[in-house]
Image: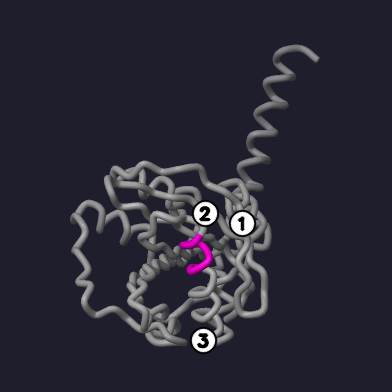
Amino acid sequence: MNRRAQAWLMAVLMIVASIAAAELRPTQLLRTLPKQWLEQAVPARFGDWQLDTSIVPVAPDPTVQAAVDRIYTDVLSRTYVNNRGERMMLLIAYGQQQNDSLRVHQPEGCYGGQGFVVGPSLFGEVDVAGRTLPVRRLVATLGLRVEPITYWMTVGNELVLTGWDAKRAQLKSGLLGQLPDGLLFRVSSIDGNADAAYRAQQGFLDQLLQATPAPARAILTGQGGA
């Protein structure tokens, strides 16, 4: 094949690819949830845990808040305390659309950007509400503050733990013509003993998700739902 024919073939293939990309571009949201649905769905009191009203949230920097508002459509940030005075910090950040420019951020980057020294991220599991969920765990340190973290992410109806998993789930939804949603589910505590912290987080998560209504629990754990 001569160069002119090769050039024509390449041009045709590019046009076909452009048309295919346009046809496959997802246009339908996987689901539409009401405003502040996290506030309503996630219980404020369960088991021996309740909201710690002594903790006053610090307003984020306006630039940071603008970035959060662009990526997420609903963010729930709470601190819980039990009758032994132990505290757990919960963050759930939900985005109605997941694409190449709007995607939930993994905690490693968020904590590192705030000056924390972030340890290696390890894969693990938690037994919650009668199911075993894969999770990631890491320890973030800032001075004397040692914060073990357990988290997972979802894209559409799949629980994902890596950026590659998230991209795969996004492409899978795209092929079905759907715009998937996504969320970050993170729990952490201040504890110099990471193993003890992870055990405590396991118990907290089990009680929390058992008390969460089933449709919301399904969304929070990547198992579908309306």
Residue 88: give x, y in percent of width and height: 38, 70
Amino acid under label 3?
Ala
Q: Residue 102 lies in magenta, yes or no?
A: no
Q: How many marks?
A: 3
* Residue 30 visible in the picture: yes
Q: Which mark is residue 124?
A: 1
What residue do we see at 49% from left, 80% from top? 208
Amino acid under label 1?
Gly
In the picture of the structure, the residue carrying the numbered disc 3 is: 211
Left or right: 84 with respect to 219?
A: left
* Residue 74 visible in the picture: no
* Relative vertical location of residue 8 with respect to residue 148 in this rendering, above or below: above
What residue do we see at 51% from left, 57% from top? 195
Amino acid under label 2?
Arg
What residue do we see at 72% from left, 26% from top? 9
Q: Which residues are magenta?
A: 196-201
The answer to whether marks 2 and 1 mark residues whose Cβ atoms lie closer than 8 Å is yes
What residue do we see at 44% from left, 81% from top? 42
The earlier-in-sequence mark between 1 and 3 is: 1
Q: Which mark is residue 7?
A: none
The earlier-in-sequence mark between 2 and 1 is: 1
For label 1, the SS is strand
Q: Main secondary structure of the magenta part?
A: helix
Q: Which mark is residue 137?
A: 2
